[in-house]
Amino acid sequence: MSRCSEIIIFSYFCDRLSYKDKIDIAKLPKHIAIIMDGNGRWARQRGEDRVMGHRNGVTSVRETVEAAAEIGVEYLTLYAFSTENWNRPQEEVMALMQLLVSTISLEVKTLNENDIRLLAIGDLSSLPADCLMELNEAIKATSNNKRMSLVLALSYSSRWEILRAIKSITADIELGKIQTSEITEQNFEKHLCTSGFPEPELMIRTSGEHRISNFLLWQLAYAELYFTEKLWPDFRKEDLYEAIVDYQGRERRFGKTSAQLKPHS
C-alpha cells in the first residue's frame, strides 16, 4: 500500500471518529454553562405549541447531563428559567413550572444512581411553593453526591444577582463587618450565587442566537463562547462533545500574548 493510500485511509477513519474520541481529558473544562434555547421554535416548526418544545427539551437535558458526567466535567450549569421568562404567557409559565416539578421528581433516583449533586441558583423564593418544595427535597436528597454538580439557574438573571451582591456588601459595610477599601474581586464573588463554584470555562448556546442574555455576566468574563444552530430539543451527546473539542482547539491567553504562553526552550 502506498504512503498516499495510508494517509487517505487514516484521514477517513479520523473523520468517522466520534467527537468524544477526540477530546483531551487532560484539558477538559471543569465547568460548562449552557443556555438551552430554541424550544419554542422547535415546536412551531412541527405545528405544536411551545410547551411541547419544552417537554422534548427534557431529553436533551438528560443526554447532556449524562455525557458531561461520563467524561468528567465537574460542574454543569443549565439556564432553565430567567427572571424575564415570568413575562411570558401565563399558561406557558405554569406549564413550565409543572414540567419542572415532575421532571425533578422523576430524576432524583437517576441523579443518585449516577452520583450527581443537584444545586440551584437564582431568586428561588419567587418559584411556586410546590416547585420550590420539590426542588429543595431533590437538593437535599442528592447533597452527598460527588461525581458532578448539576446547577439549575431558575428565576435567574445576572443583573439581579449582581445587584443582590451589592446590597449584601452594602449591608456588611453598614454593620461594620467590612470596610469599603477591603472590597476586592474575591470578596465580591463570595456574595454571588455561584460562590464556591469554579468559573465556567465554556458557555454553549443553542438555536443560533449570538448573545448571553443576562446569564452569568460576571462569571463568563473569560469563558470561551460556543454557538450552535441546533435547537435545544435536537441537542445530543455528540453536540456537547463537538463543543468541547472546539473549545480545546482555542488558545486561552487571559490577556497575555501567544508568545508568553509558549514554553521557553
Image (tube, grey):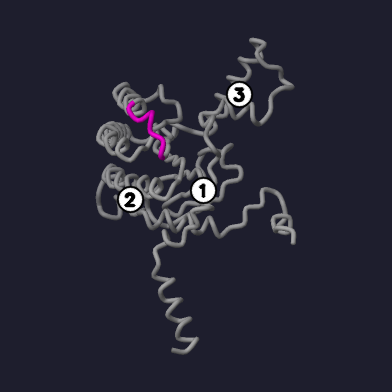
CA distance for labels 1 and 2: 23 Å
Badge 3 amino acid: Ile
Q: Earlier in the sequence, mark 1 or mark 2?
A: 1
Which residue is label 3 attached to? 166
Secondary structure under tag 2 reads helix
Q: Which residue is found at the position 37% from the left and 48% from the top? A: 64
Q: Is residue 265 left or right of residue 168?
A: right
**Which quarter shows the C terminus?**
bottom right
Residue 193 vertical placement versus 57 (above, below): above
Question: Residue 254: percent from the left, percent from the top?
Answer: 67, 48
Which residue is label 2 attached to? 233
Which residue appears farthest toward the top when viewing the image?
175
Q: Which residue is found at the position 49% from the left and 86% from the top? A: 4
Secondary structure under tag 1 reads loop
How many neighbours does mark 3 have within 10 angstroms: few (below 14), some (14-19), or many (20 or more)?
some
Q: Earlier in the sequence, mark 1 or mark 3?
A: 1
Q: Which residues are magenta?
A: 141-147
How many neighbours does mark 1 have within 10 angstroms: few (below 14), some (14-19), or many (20 or more)?
some
Q: Main secondary structure of the magenta part?
A: loop
Q: Earlier in the sequence, mark 2 or mark 3?
A: 3
Q: Tell me the number on the disc at residue 139.
A: none
Q: Is residue 9 left or right of residue 138?
A: right
The nearer-to-camera label among 1 and 3 is 1
**Residue 208 placement: quadrant:** bottom left
Q: Which residue is found at the position 59% from the left and 20% from the top? A: 167
Badge 2 amino acid: Pro
**Which quarter shows the N terminus?**
bottom left
Question: Residue 257: percent from the left, percent from the top?
Answer: 72, 55
Which residue is label 1 attached to? 29
| Nearer-the-camera pick, 102 or 196 | 196
Badge 1 amino acid: Pro
Q: Is residue 162 left or right of residue 113?
A: right
